[in-house]
Image: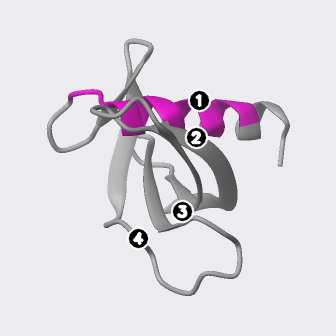
Amino acid sequence: MIVSNYSIAFNYPLETSGRVVPLIAQVEKHHSQTYYIVKNFRTNPGQNRSIMSDIKIKKVNGRWVHCDSEKESNLSIAIGKAIMIQEADGK
């Protein structure tokens, strides 16, 4: 069951180049075994197509990990920080 749906903006650090890509995405928070589906990744608000596949992440022992592998990545960490900020702001 979806409990909330909102947009986030975050910086995604590319692992090999040291560059950072600013991204926007939609987040759906699911209530059962709280996890988040993150989708519609884009580089600007007017962009129509997602540039990446949807992912599912969750917070486990203070770490933001992918639901399928239970491993963290630069992407899951960056999204997790943006989710924490968004939810702390109560939006």
Badge nearest the viewer, 1 or 3: 1
Badge 4 density bin: few <14, some 14–19, many ≥20, Cα 10 Å: few
Q: Which residue is mark 1?
A: 81
For the residues marked 3 and 2, what is the alpha-carbon distance in whole angstroms?
Answer: 25 Å
Does label 1 or label 3 sit earlier along the sequence? 3
Residue 78 in magenta stretch = yes
Q: Amino acid at mark 2?
A: Asn
Give x and y (percent) for residue 87: 73, 38
Reading the image, the residue beneath label 4 is 51
Residue under pointer 3: 2
Residue 63 point in image, percent of width and height: 39, 18
Q: Closer to the N terminus: mark 1 or mark 2?
A: 2
Assess whether residue 31 is covered by the magenta stretch: no
Q: What residue occupies the far top of the structure in this picture?
A: 61
Q: Measure the C-alpha gap from mark 1 to mark 3.
A: 20 Å
Q: Which residues are magenta?
A: 71-85
Along the line of sight, the residue nearer the viewer: 42 or 90:
42
Q: Residues within 10 Å of mark 2 (few under 14, many from 20)?
A: some
SS majority, magenta: helix
Query: Three-letter amino acid code at disc 1?
Result: Lys
Is 46 placed left or right of 47 in the picture?
right
Could you give the CA–CA distance between mark 1 and mark 2, rounded to whole angstroms?
10 Å
Residues at marks 2 and 4, CA–CA distance in whole angstroms: 14 Å
Q: Quadrant of residue 51?
A: bottom left
